[in-house]
Amino acid sequence: MENFGETLINLDNQDNILSISGISMMEDAIDFYKDVKDQIDNYFKTKHQILTIVFELSYFNSSSAKQFIQLLSKLEGGKGKAIWKYPKDHIIMYDRGRELEILVDVPFEFKGV
């Protein structure tokens, strides 16, 4: 598990889950998420199983959103799905997940927590 300030990222190869949680508002999101994109690429080189990305964020900025689109696009073509966990009383985070869902061809599941 990697902890970059407020963002926690964990790729569990055994359970085929990539978790991204916390707050994602770093200045250089491209550089920050480069390793994560590489991990996904390496995952698909060695495994031929569906990868689930679980997002459980309380906030993310627009540069992080662009990186999430790139991460999710790696799951297109039946390679994976997304689980979007959001605080039940935080409609904005729910809406932000719906916005991402529209932009990629990846199944989304929404869970209010």
Image (spheres, grey):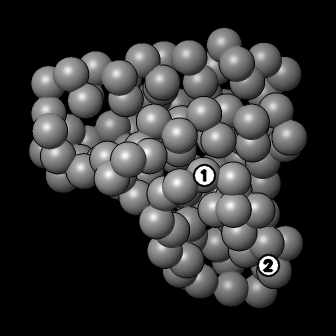
Residue for point 78% across, 47% down: 60
Determine the residue positioned at 81% across, 80% down. Answer: 91
Against 4, residue 75 (above or below) is below
- Pick the residue in front: 57 or 44: 44
Toward the front, the furthest residue is: 77
The first of marks 1 and 2 along the sequence is: 2
Q: Nearer the viewer, residue 79 or 113?
A: 79
From the viewer's perspective, is residue 57 above or below residue 12?
below
Image mark count:
2
Give me the residue at 69% from left, 62% from top. Answer: 102
Q: Which residue is mark 2?
A: 90
Between marks 1 and 2 in the image, the one whose residue lies nearer the viewer: 1
Q: Are dots 1 and 2 in contact, CB under 8 Å? A: no
Q: Residues within 10 Å of mark 2 (few under 14, many from 20)?
A: few
| Left or right of 2 in this view: 92 | right
Q: Position of residue 89 (x, y in %)?
A: 77, 86
Disc 1 and disc 2: Cα gap in Å? Answer: 23 Å
- Amino acid tagged 2: His
Residue 2 in sight from this viewpoint: yes
- Give SS at disc 1: loop
Image x and y of residue 24, in percent: 72, 40
Which labelled disc corresponds to residue 104? 1
Residue 9 in the figure: left or right of residue 67: left
